[in-house]
C-alpha cells in the first residue's frame, strides 16, 4: 500500500540538534534518551521512506523563537523541498508574535519557494489558536488554497505551556470563522479526544492525525472514528523522528482499521488535502 506521511521531519543532524536544544523538550529528551538517536542525511531518510512504501511526506517547519529560546526549523524544511520537490511538501512554521514580518515571510515562502501549507504551535507560542494574531495567516491560507497544521497534544514536562491554547473548542471557532480553511489537527487534540472527534465530525474542513499518541490507551477511539463517521477525515502522520516512522507503521498495521478506512487513512485523505 502506498503511504503519505502528513507530519515528518528528516532526522538530520540539524533536526536532532533543534530538538535537543529546545528547552521545552528537555524532559522528553531525557526520558527517551533522544541524544542517542543517530543523525542521518536527507538522502538516507528519503531512501528509508521509499523502502517503507512512503510515496510522499509533509515536512513541517516550526518557528517559536519569540516565545522560546530555540531556532526556527524552516530552513531545514525549505532545504528538504528544494532537494526533493516531488517527494516532500513543505509547511511553513509561523511565529505569530512577529506579526507582519512573519506574514510577509510566509507569503514569500509560498509564492517563491513552493511552500504549500502553514504550521502553527499555539501552546508553545503562547497564543491561542483562535487568537487575533493568527487570523491574518488563516486568511492568507484561504487566499492561497493551502492548509494549516495545528500542533496539539500534551508533551510531558513543558514549562509554562498552557495546552488550552489549542483546545478543540477553540479550533471549532477557527473552523467556523474560516470554512474555506483546511485545518489538520496534529496529535489528535489529546487529551480532549472525544471533543476533537466531535469538532472534526461537525466541520467539513477539519482533519485529524493522532501521531505521538502511540503510548496512550485511547487510540481505539480514533480508530473507531476512522472506521465510521471520520473515514474521510483522519490522516497518517508519523511525527518522525520523535517516533521512528518504521515503528509507527508497525503499530498502524496492528490497528483494527477496516480495509476501506486503512486506505483512506494511509493515503487517500492526505492525497486529497495535498492535491496529489
Image (spheres, rainbow, N blue to C red):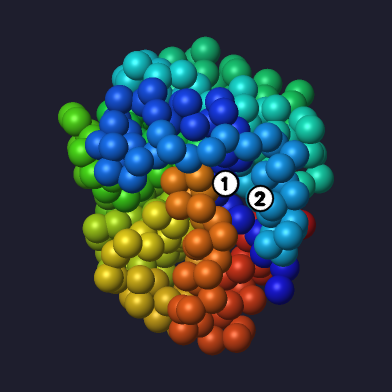
Comparing 206 with 212, the one in front is 212
Q: Is 223 situated above or below 199?
A: below
- Disc 2 residue crowd, few under 14, some 14–19, many 20+, Cα 10 Å: many
Q: Which residue is mark 1?
A: 8
Please name whichever residue, 4 or 273, is drawn nearer the observer in this view of the structure.
4
Identity of the residue drawn at 45% across and 52% down: 243
Q: Are marks 1 and 2 in contact (CB under 8 Å)?
A: yes
**Residue at horizontal 35%, vertical 16%?**
69
Q: How many marks?
A: 2
Picture coordinates of residue 177, whole percent (x, y): 42, 46
Reading the image, the residue beneath label 2 is 57
Rendered position, 37 above or below 172: above
Q: CA distance from mark 1 to mark 2?
A: 6 Å
Q: Secondary structure at mark 1?
A: strand
Q: Position of residue 193 (x, y in %)?
A: 29, 64
Point out the tag, 1 or 2, that comes first from the N-terminus. Answer: 1
Amino acid at each position: 500500500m502506498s503511504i503519505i506521511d502528513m507530519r515528518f521531519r528528516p532526522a538530520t543532524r540539524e533536526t536532532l540538534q533543534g530538538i535537543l536544544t529546545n528547552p521545552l523538550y528537555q524532559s522528553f529528551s531525557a526520558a527517551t534518551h533522544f541524544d542517542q538517536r543517530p543523525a542521518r542525511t536527507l538522502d538516507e531518510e528519503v531512501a528509508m521512506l521509499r523502502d517503507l512504501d512512503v510515496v510522499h511526506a509533509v515536512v513541517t517547519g516550526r518557528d517559536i523563537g519569540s516565545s522560546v529560546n530555540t531556532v526556527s526549523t524552516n530552513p531545514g524544511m525549505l532545504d528538504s523541498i528544494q532537494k526533493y520537490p516531488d517527494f516532500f511538501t513543505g509547511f511553513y512554521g509561523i511565529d505569530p508574535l512577529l506579526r507582519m514580518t512573519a506574514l510577509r515571510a510566509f507569503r514569500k515562502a509560498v509564492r517563491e519557494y513552493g511552500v504549500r501549507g502553514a504550521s502553527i504551535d499555539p501552546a508553545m507560542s503562547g497564543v491561542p489558536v483562535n487568537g487575533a494574531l493568527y487570523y491574518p495567516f488563516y486568511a492568507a491560507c484561504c487566499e492561497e488554497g493551502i492548509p494549516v497544521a495545528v500542533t496539539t497534544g500534551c508533551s510531558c514536562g513543558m514549562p509554562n505551556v498552557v495546552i488550552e491554547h489549542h483546545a478543540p473548542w477553540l479550533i471549532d471557532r477557527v473552523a467556523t470563522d474560516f470554512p474555506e480553511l483546511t485545518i489538520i489537527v496534529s496529535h489528535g487534540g489529546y487529551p480532549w479526544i472525544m471533543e476533537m472527534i466531535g469538532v472534526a465530525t461537525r466541520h467539513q474542513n477539519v482533519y485529524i492525525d493522532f501521531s505521538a499518541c502511540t503510548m496512550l490507551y485511547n487510540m481505539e477511539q480514533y480508530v473507531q472514528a476512522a472506521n465510521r463517521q471520520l473515514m474521510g477525515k483522519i490522516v497518517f502522520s508519523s511525527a518522525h523522528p520523535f517516533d521512528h516512522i518504521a515503528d509507527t507503521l508497525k503499530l498502524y498495521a496492528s490497528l483494527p482499521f477496516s480495509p476501506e478506512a486503512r486506505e483512506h487513512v494511509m493515503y487517500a485523505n492526505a492525497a486529497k488535502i495535498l492535491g496529489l
